[in-house]
Amino acid sequence: MRPGFGGPAIPVGVDVQVESLDTISEVDMDFTMTLYLRHYWKDERLAFPSNTNQSMTFDGRLVKKIWVPDMFFVHSKRSFIHDTTTDNVMLRVYPDGKVLYSLRVTVTAMCNMDLSRFPLDTQTCSLEIESYAYTDDDLMLYWKKGNASLQTDERISLSQFLIQKFHTTTKLAFYSSTGWYNRLYITFTLRRHIFFFLLQTYFPATLMVMLSWVSFWIDRRAVPARVPLGITTVLTMSTIITGVNASMPRVSYIKAVDIYLWVSFVFVFLSVIEYAAVNYLTTVQERKERKLRDRLPCTCGMPHAGTLLNSSYSDVDVNTTGNYGMPEENGDKRERILVQLALADGRTGGRGKGVRGYASIWIDTHAIDKYSRVIFPGAYTLFNIIYWTIYS
């Protein structure tokens, strides 16, 4: 029977010394903590006369023969009392009947995490202690010294988190079938280290996006160079996304890292689509070019026209990687050639209008890569500024 049975609630003070905070698991949403749990109460039935006022200390064998508080950890998944080399339990009784009951426990408890800002998040977890059988009418559970009742080892550290603070609170918990119970909370706040994720996730994703921009400076006829570059960056981004999600719980909301990776994936994918558009327009241009060559009038009035056409519109040039038989200056050689043909055709009363229309198409196709060199880096830089401003 509890001390003072039938009378007022017996006060039981508690203090805790945290020995280690072992693991924090986002997948299982729990944490593991090893602590010294100490209870203080007074049981006059255990009082004994003493001239020296010295206490008596016992091991765990006496615990089974007297009344002790029936504490348990709310929302715990696993817990055990250490038993090496013997049960880590200590009972100390003072002459006036005061009792100190101490045990060393490792407990794995649930921690509901909000990962919407992962990995730029801060998590708050709590370990809850409560009497299993005695309501607040029989047992008054309280922190013996307030916040000073919680002590931590300064050497406690975690690989992914910075422990910001520990603090204690007390609340009442209600169960519809049994009543009200005193509940003690050990609450701690954790801020995640970002450097690991910068090296493993953010920097590789950013480099893949920047690598996809290299194709804008490669000649648009170099299909063996541009296509594998685009496909490689897309597959690498897919691997990064899969690797990050493999170590995360399958939550139903979007995390901060998902936003960054998927936006980066879209940029890489758009660089591939950009080349598809350039390649298609180039193919259309070449068809018009062959038709133009077949429709050209007599070039008797144009000096070296045969050489000009052979060097500019040969079938071999269609399959080469930019070697058109004449040196280019900033990619504008073909535009100048077509303008000359348009003027010559005008003098001979030919189809100058069709030639000028084709020259316009050529310049638009050439401008896609040129504009992409500015638009893609600018848009991605703007996204990074907005992203880090919101989540930092």
Image (tube, rainbow, N blue to C red):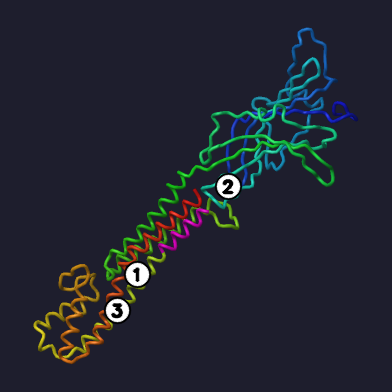
Q: Tell which residue pokes out farthest to the right in this image.
A: 6
**Residue shown at the point (28%, 72%) measured from the top left:** 366
Q: Is residue 3 above or below residue 244?
A: above
Q: Secondary structure at mark 2?
A: loop
As drawn, the label of residue 372 is none
Q: Is residue 244 left or right of residue 15?
A: left
Marks 3 & 1, CB-CB < 8 Å contact: no
| Amino acid identity at mark 1 | Tyr
Q: How far apart in space, not on screen, are marks 2 and 1 (Cα)?
A: 40 Å
Q: Residues within 10 Å of mark 1 (few under 14, many from 20)?
A: many
Q: Image quarter for residue 353?
A: bottom left
Nearest to the eye among marks 2 and 1: give it: 1
The x, y position of residue 276, in whole percent, is: 36, 72
Nearest to the eye among marks 3 and 1: give it: 3
Which residue position holds label 3?
A: 361
As drawn, the label of residue 275 is 1
The x, y position of residue 224, in whole percent, is: 30, 67
